[in-house]
Image (cartoon, grey):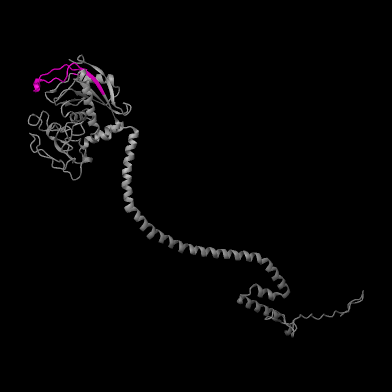
């Protein structure tokens, strides 16, 4: 049995958001569908796609996703169901040799991975994850290089769980392998840190993988298993959705921790935990179209802007109006301007007046000087002393004393009546202010020419 038991019909793009090299592309492959049943495969594919696009966080990342449907017909319907795992023993001839009871676990549904990869690569140029949809009503699935899912009643939930393994590298968060009460050797997890992002052996608040998602009020570890020989039976002690460190994960009862009490990677029907959602967003966001990213940023900015505007109206605006303008800015500005600028204006006015007076004085000085010279030339030295320093009494007294001393020394030349009247500023002569002409001295008669002076 194998590729000889059927044929590849072809690929159809059923969700197109752009180039496959830019988008996150899923290829859904038919297995165990006969040619007449491919219409059912189309319906099953669309049902899964509808579920995917309405599941968080895929619902907000639709623009990043492209989906192909690869039609492959098989000779028979269904998948192998070995008796060794309690199956019916059916062995239908199918293209990818689908079979339950992988690794001895009934629910572990596997296919020939190499044949699946070859078929997809031959029909779809670029892809990110492959999911094989097996036409069987038996519950089962698996995740690895490809995800494998049956058409059981919970098929879509199984598909979301298995894609978590194949596309994002999530670990199983449940604490058993074959089943609680059945497992042997799964009491204590090995002391090796798992590589998957959603399980750990470290419960330290500061260093756990998802430390940034743990609240300060959340106890760490959040739960511990009192009996490591069994699955922990205790209910969730924390509010739903609390991120912490819950013991029991990665197929072991103790020694391994999961982020939340429940997650789609632990039990079907629950949403992805916060750690898983973050990884999905980180993986798909780079595949979003630029327009979609800008739209998301715009909407996010708009929401923040509305919130900020609400705060401004209630708090910031009244503070600016009442304190900054009316109580502080105006009074300080007015007082400083009045006190400083009035003094400055007065000083400037005084400077202008002084400059104007100096200018006028310089302009008048030559003319006044000429007049004073004329007057001094007419009235004599006395007028000069009195006019040049009219307000210096000490200087005037000294000069008057010097003048009187000079007059005393000249007393043998003039009569007391001819002495100057200093109070009048002119010579005085018995009521007549006019100066008198001194009498001419008589000269002896000239000798005749050739006469000799008398001898003594």
Question: The N terminus lies in which quarter of the figure?
Answer: top left
Query: Where 31 falls versus 298 (above or below)?
Result: above
Question: Residue 441 at what x, y percent from top left?
Answer: 82, 80
Query: Where 415 falls versus 33 (above or below)?
Result: below
Compare residues 426 and 262 and report the one nearer the observer: 262
In the rendered structure, does residue 28 fall within the stretch colored magenta?
no
Residue in the picture at 41% in, 60% down: 330
Compare residues 361 and 441 and report the one nearer the observer: 361
Residue range in magenta is 69-96
Question: Residue 166 at what x, y percent from top left?
Answer: 22, 27
Q: Tell whether 430 sits left or right of 443.
A: left
Question: Residue 218 at what x, y percent from top left?
Answer: 17, 44
Quarter location, residue 447: bottom right
Quarter location, residue 52: top left
Q: Tell whether 129 sits left or right of 251.
A: right
Query: Where 450 falls versus 54 (above or below)?
Result: below
Secondary structure mostly seen in the magenta stretch = loop
Residue in the picture at 34% in, 33% down: 290
Question: The C terminus lies in which quarter of the figure?
Answer: bottom right
Q: Tell whether 55 sits left or right of 351.
A: left
In the rendered structure, does residue 74 fall within the stretch colored magenta?
yes
Compare residues 325 and 131 and report the one nearer the observer: 131
């Amino acid at each position: 049995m194998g590729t000889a038991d059927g044929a590849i019909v072809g690929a159809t793009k059923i969700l197109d958001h752009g180039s496959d090299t830019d988008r996150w592309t899923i290829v859904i492959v038919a297995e165990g569908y006969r040619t007449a049943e491919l219409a059912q495969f189309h319906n099953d594919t669309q049902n899964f796609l509808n579920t995917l696009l309405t599941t968080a966080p895929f619902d907000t990342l639709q623009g990043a996703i492209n989906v192909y449907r690869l039609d492959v017909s098989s000779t028979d319907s269904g998948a192998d169901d070995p008796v060794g795992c309690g199956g019916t023993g059916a062995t239908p001839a199918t293209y990818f040799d689908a079979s339950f009871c992988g690794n001895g676990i009934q629910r572990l549904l596997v296919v020939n991975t190499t044949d699946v990869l070859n078929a997809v690569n031959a029909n779809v140029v670029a892809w990110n994850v492959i999911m094989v949809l097996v036409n069987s009503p038996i519950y089962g699935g698996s995740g690895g290089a490809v995800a494998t899912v049956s058409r059981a009643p919970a098929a879509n939930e199984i598909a979301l769980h298995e894609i978590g393994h194949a596309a994002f590298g999530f670990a199983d968060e449940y604490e058993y392998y074959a089943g609680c009460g059945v497992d042997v050797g799964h009491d204590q997890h090995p002391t090796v840190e798992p590589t998957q992002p959603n399980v750990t052996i470290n419960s330290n608040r500061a260093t756990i993988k998802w430390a940034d998602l743990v609240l300060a009020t959340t106890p760490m570890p959040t739960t511990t298993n009192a009996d490591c020989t069994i699955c922990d039976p205790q209910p969730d002690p924390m509010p739903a959705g609390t991120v912490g460190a819950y013991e029991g994960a990665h197929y072991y009862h103790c020694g391994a921790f999961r982020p939340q009490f429940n997650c789609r990677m632990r039990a079907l029907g629950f949403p992805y935990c916060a750690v898983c959602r973050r990884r999905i967003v980180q993986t798909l966001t780079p595949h979003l179209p630029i327009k979609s990213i800008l739209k998301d940023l715009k909407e996010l900015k708009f929401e923040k802007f509305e919130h900020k505007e609400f705060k401004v109206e209630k708090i910031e605006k009244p503070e600016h109006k009442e304190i900054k303008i009316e109580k502080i800015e105006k009074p300080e500005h007015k007082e400083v301007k009045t006190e400083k600028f009035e003094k400055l204006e007065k000083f400037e006015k005084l400077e202008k007046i002084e400059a104007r007076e100096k200018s006028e004085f310089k302009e008048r000085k030559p003319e006044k000087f000429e007049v004073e010279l004329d007057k001094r030339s007419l009235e004599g030295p006395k007028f000069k002393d009195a006019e040049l320093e009219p307000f210096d009494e000490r200087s005037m007294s000294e000069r008057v004393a010097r003048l009187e001393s000079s007059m005393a020394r000249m007393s043998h030349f003039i009569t007391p009546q001819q002495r100057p009247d200093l109070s009048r500023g002119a010579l005085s002569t018995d009521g007549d202010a006019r100066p008198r002409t001194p009498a001419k001295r008589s000269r002896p008669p000239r000798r005749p020419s050739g006469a000799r002076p008398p001898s003594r």
